[in-house]
Image (cartoon, grey):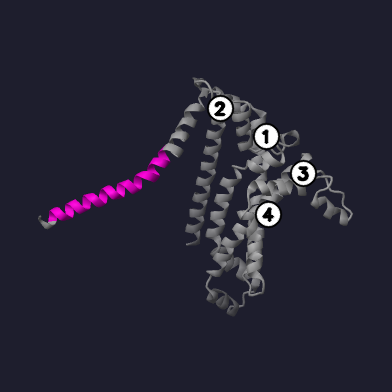
Amino acid sequence: MPQTMRRSTLHRREHRAALAFVAVPVTGFLLFTLYPLGYSVYASFTDWNGLSAPKFSGLKNYVTMFQDPYFRKSLWNTVFMMLAIPVGLVVSLALALAMNRKMRGTTFFRTVYYLPVISSIAAVAILWQWAFNGDFGLINQVLALVGIDGPNWLQNAGTVKPALMIMAVWKGLGYSMLLYLAALQSVPRYLYEAAALDGANAWKQFVNITIPMVRPVTFFLLVTSIIGGSQVFVEVNIMTPTGGPEFSSATIVWYIWQKAFDNLQMGYASAMSVVLGLLVFLVTFLQFRLNRRNQFSID
């Protein structure tokens, strides 16, 4: 058999083997991602209860959505609770700076801070539900030691969102801290030594060296946190199963779930899901554009 024919046969075999390996994830993507996404877009233009056949209704669901005060309220709650993201990033960076110092017990503290990340979100929500209890919760007991009469956190419209934000910061602290710590440990020491020789104090070194060097991690955490923050559901459903007092803790995903599975308004829920997906895509796209513009300005 000629050498070229052997190579051609071997090439075809390798090509078929490669296609077989690629076919598995591609098939999974088509079946479990692309098809549900496309069907959700279609369902958003229908009147569908999830049981009978969907009936085309045009833009009715979208018109209803933008006239729905509960949709606007849940969207506002979701955006408001994202204010916890910059707080979490600042606290995480501060902890990473502390853990980056040569001191005893850093491994133990890293483990302690990371435990909430690997813990079940349902178990964490139940734990914090008990801690925020207005009668016998741990937080109010601590406040009582300093003479403060704590509120009923989860039953008060003014405190339920801050309570959920505190839990969210605590839950994601370890993950952000470890990423920041890895970034800090990759910063060359000679940059700080050169800055010290030029007379830069610790604050100037932090602003001009540390912050720019950890910017990629900050950008990654900001993007993923906003995407994750737009999908908050389990905490709200466990800690405030009715959406909180005056609908003050209901997030957009929780409201979508309520409409889809409690009220069997699958078409309406699909329309809200499409709008949420577009909003997340738009915010993520703007973040990438701003980050690229900042990189060009730095260069």
- What residue is pinned by disc 2? 266
As drawn, is 102 to the left or to the right of 32? right
Q: What residue is shown at x 72% (from left), y 39% (from top)?
A: 240
Question: Is the N terminus in the top left, top right, bottom left or bottom right quadrant?
Answer: bottom left
Instruction: Tell me the kind of residue under disc 4.
Output: Trp
- What residue is pinned by disc 3? 159
Q: Position of residue 251 (x, y in %)?
A: 65, 38
**C-alpha gap between disc 3 and disc 4:** 17 Å
As drawn, is 295 to the left or to the right of 143? left
Q: What residue is shown at x 53% (from left), y 76% (from top)?
A: 190
Instruction: Tell me the kind of residue under disc 1.
Output: Lys
Instruction: Tell me the kind of residue under disc 3.
Output: Thr
Which region of the structure is painted magenta? 4-30
Q: Earlier in the sequence, mark 1 or mark 2?
A: 1
**Residue 160's image quarter?**
top right
Instruction: Tell me the kind of residue under disc 2.
Output: Met
Q: Position of residue 239 (x, y in %)?
A: 71, 42
Q: Please identify the dominant SS of the magenta region.
A: helix
Q: What residue is shown at x 35% (from left), y 47% (from top)?
A: 22
- What residue is pinned by disc 1? 73
Q: Earlier in the sequence, mark 2 or mark 3?
A: 3
Disc 1 residue crowd, few under 14, some 14–19, many 20+, Cα 10 Å: some
Front disc: 1 or 3: 3
Q: What residue is shown at x 57% (from left), y 54% (from top)?
A: 221
- What residue is pinned by disc 4? 170
Disc 2 residue crowd, few under 14, some 14–19, many 20+, Cα 10 Å: many
